[in-house]
Image: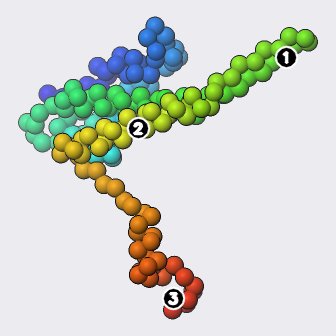
Amino acid sequence: MAVDLSDYVENLKREVSAPGLTQLPNATDAEYLGNLQDGFWESVLDGVITGFTESDGIVTNKSAGGADIGRDLVQLVVFYAGFRIVRNQLRDLKTSFKAKAGTVDYEIEQSANVLKAIMDDLTKRRSIVLARLGDIGSTHSYYFDQIQGRENSIIYGDSYWISQDNGYKY
């Protein structure tokens, strides 16, 4: 049996809206489903979900007769989809509006610091998920220390681009 991502559209709506509010009143269920599909594939690319595939919103196990994707991993797909939606909302959000008609002024501003804090929080949550899944052996986490790599290249002369006088002709 397979898992239908369209069953989780309401979960995604709750992920991107405050209680009692509809943040995206013009969004259709098909658009939410598309974000769930994209969230699934982003989680696959991040290595969070393995062994499953998705087609037309239906998630199936790649192994014949394998178990369905668990509710915990579906919630990660909802998180990834919500992350995409919020990121796209913030991309299009105007942070300042000012209007003047005669002697009347009207001004509204959304703090860019608040928007940055929201995005930082989402990014941190995603990093925690990836690190935690690496801890329990569900996925692999890799960290590259580029500063140390650069320092070693300078010290040992491993990279031809470190200095001009390294014997290479350009």
- Using the numbered discs, state the Cα–Cα distance from disc 1 to disc 3 in whole angstroms: 64 Å
Answer yes or no: do the residues labelled 1 and 3 have beta carbons within 8 Å?
no
Instruction: Identify which amino acid the numbered label 1 is placed on.
Output: Lys
From what the image shows, is residue 98 above or below residue 101?
Answer: below
* Residue occupying the point 86% across, 10% down: 104
* Residue occupying the point 33% across, 38% down: 128
Disc 3 marks which residue? 166
Spot occupied by residue 93 in the image (x, y as percentages of width and height): 62, 28
Spot occupied by residue 61 in the image (x, y as percentages of width and height): 17, 37
Disc 1 marks which residue? 100
Give the class, few, some or many, for how many residues have Cα within 10 Å of label 2's Cα (few <14, many ≥20). Answer: few
1 or 2: tag closer to the N-terminus? 1
1 or 3: tag closer to the N-terminus? 1
Q: Secondary structure at mark 2?
A: helix
Give the class, few, some or many, for how many residues have Cα within 10 Å of label 1's Cα (few <14, many ≥20). Answer: few
Give the quarter of the figure containing the N terminus: top left
Mark sitting on residue 124: 2
Q: Secondary structure at mark 3?
A: loop
Spot occupied by residue 60 in the image (x, y as percentages of width and height): 20, 34
Residue 51 in sight: no
**Viewed as shown, does residue 68 lie left or right of 142?**
left
Spot occupied by residue 91 in the image (x, y as percentages of width and height): 58, 34
Residue 158 in sight: yes
